[in-house]
């Protein structure tokens, strides 16, 4: 009703004036008056229609027409409609922009294909993994750009539950898992995920299982063989039986050591196993390790300990004992009789350094980077002869990494090696003046 009352009121007023004219001046004057009114109304309407059409043609440049009466009402409603559409369009644009930014930032390669398998859109990661260019390759047939036989088969099969594992066409080092996802009206999304690390971990896992099986097979075969021999020959001379038992004991111990090292590694690797941050009296620990080294060497080597600094470190005493112990035991095992082994604990540029220097067989430079790999051995027979599991330095590396420390290896073949565990400044606890807790030298503490 709001729209009608004003035009009806104007019409009523015109009719009233016309009736007054009729009574006062007759029919001709009334007709003239009504014709004048009609012409005015028509011209006004034409003017407003012109303004409206101009505005509709350039709604963003021309300001909306301003009028009173019914035209004013119409313009006001149209302007409101236009503002609402503007707001909706802005909202849609910003949602689209946000979606596009997110798709650009996704680390997986994403390619949208139309029903003819032409590229409609692809994100920057698809350049890195598939060599596609978001600008240049728009509209290209994906089959002409990625032509490997297994990929074409994969496209033809259109089996959306399957993933294709393949090498990146532009970098053979990258392993990809490709998946097709149908969407919209016969469009497809091709997703390329980088699974290089997963593949590497899988290869490592398989190698690890193969290595463990291989390591266990020899001692188990030996023990099994002796048990059979003993079972089949109850009358075996005691001297032979004793020899067999001793060999069985050696191999059983070897398996035991292997299992102990495997358990240590798995404990170190498990994420839940947090690091104990206790103050570790390293000088004291080194005294214990020195005597352990003496007993392992059984007088075959000259072992010295040089404690230059009373530094302690923050960490797990058990883990640090195991890591430094492994380095020392390697020095003893790989140094021939009458060789010298020096243990030292000192400060270097604020870092704490434990070094073990031996006059052993040394290691050629090309083997050094691989020493901390599990089961890696430079000299297999020497490692086995001396009871090595091939896991010692892998354990050392894990422990040091957990402590933010690093392993430095220097070696000259035929002359000897130095293995150094370097603890960062942040882990070092210095003996403060007047501090009674951290004493130096620690030798007295150990003796006491
Ligand atoms: P293993 O139990 O065989 O000693 P490790 O992981 O402790 O295993 O060491 C890996 C390899 O590094 C050893 O097999 C050995 O060849 C080499 N190695 C380690 N320490 C020394 C050393 N002090 N001198 C010479 N070679 C060493």
Image: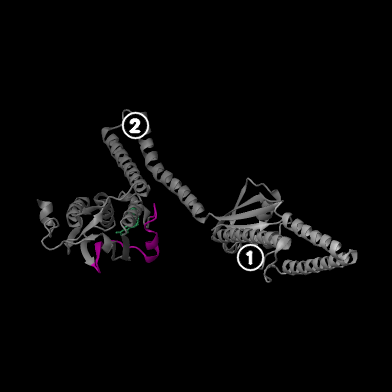
Q: Is residue 109 above or below residue 238?
A: below
Q: Position of residue 408 (x, y in %)?
A: 32, 63
Q: How is the image coloured?
A: one colour
In the image, residue 264 sits, relative to residue 85, either above or below, namely above
Question: Ligand 1: which quarter?
Answer: bottom left
Q: Which residues are magenta?
A: 348-376
> Which element is circle 2 on?
helix
**Residue nearest the viewer, comparing 93 with 327:** 93
Residue 140 appears in the rendering: no
Where is mark 2, residue-wise?
230
The image quadrant that residue 74 belongs to is bottom right
Q: Residue furthest top?
A: 234
Q: Which residue is mark 1?
A: 134
CA neighbours of label 2 inside 10 A, class few (<14), some (14 to 19), many (20+): some
- Relative to residue 361, is residue 213 drawn left or right? right
Residue 339 x/y as whole percent: 22, 61
Which residue is at the front of the view, 325 or 244? 325
Which is more toward the observer, 186 or 283?
A: 186
């Amino acid at each position: 009703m709001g729209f009608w009352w004003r035009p009806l009121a104007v019409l009523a007023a015109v009719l009233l004036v016309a009736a007054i004219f009729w009574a006062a001046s007759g029919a001709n004057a009334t007709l003239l008056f009504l014709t004048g009114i009609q012409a005015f109304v028509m011209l006004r309407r034409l003017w407003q229609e012109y303004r409206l059409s101009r505005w509709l043609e350039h709604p963003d440049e021309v300001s909306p027409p301003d009028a009173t009466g019914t035209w004013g009402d119409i313009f006001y409603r149209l302007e409101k409609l236009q503002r609402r559409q503007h707001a909706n369009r802005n909202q849609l644009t910003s949602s689209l922009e946000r979606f596009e930014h997110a798709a650009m930032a996704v680390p997986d390669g994403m390619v949208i294909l139309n029903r003819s398998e032409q590229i409609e859109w692809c994100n920057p990661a698809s350049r890195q993994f598939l060599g596609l260019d978001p600008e240049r390759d728009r509209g290209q047939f994906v089959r002409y750009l990625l032509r490997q036989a297994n990929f074409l088969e994969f496209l033809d099969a259109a089996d959306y539950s399957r993933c294709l594992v393949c090498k990146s066409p532009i970098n053979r080092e990258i392993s990809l898992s490709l998946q097709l996802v149908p969407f919209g009206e016969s469009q497809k999304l091709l997703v390329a995920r980088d699974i290089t690390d997963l593949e590497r971990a899988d290869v490592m896992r398989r190698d690890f299982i193969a290595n463990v099986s291989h390591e266990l097979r020899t001692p188990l075969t030996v023990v099994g063989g002796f048990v059979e021999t003993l079972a089949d020959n109850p009358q075996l001379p005691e001297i032979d039986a004793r020899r067999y038992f001793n060999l069985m004991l050696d191999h059983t111990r070897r398996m035991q050591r292997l299992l102990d090292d495997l358990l240590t590694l798995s404990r170190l690797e498990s994420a839940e196993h947090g690091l104990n941050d206790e103050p570790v009296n390293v000088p004291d620990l080194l005294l214990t390790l020195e005597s352990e080294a003496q007993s392992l060497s059984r007088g075959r080597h000259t072992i010295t300990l040089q404690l230059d600094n009373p530094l302690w470190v923050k960490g797990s005493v058990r883990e640090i004992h195991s890591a430094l112990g492994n380095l020392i035991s390697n020095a003893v095992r790989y140094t021939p009789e009458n060789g010298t082994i020096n243990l030292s604990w000192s400060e270097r540029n604020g870092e704490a350094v434990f070094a073990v220097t031996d006059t052993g067989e040394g290691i050629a430079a090309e083997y050094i980077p691989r020493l901390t790999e599990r089961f890696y051995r430079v000299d297999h027979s020497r490692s086995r002869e001396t009871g090595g599991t091939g896991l010692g330095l892998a354990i050392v590396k894990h422990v040091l990494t957990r402590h933010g420390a690093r392993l430095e290896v220097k070696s000259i073949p035929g002359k000897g090696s130095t293995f150094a565990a370097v603890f960062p400044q942040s882990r070092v606890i210095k003996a403060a003046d007047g501090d009674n807790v951290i004493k130096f030298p620690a030798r007295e503490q150990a003796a006491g």
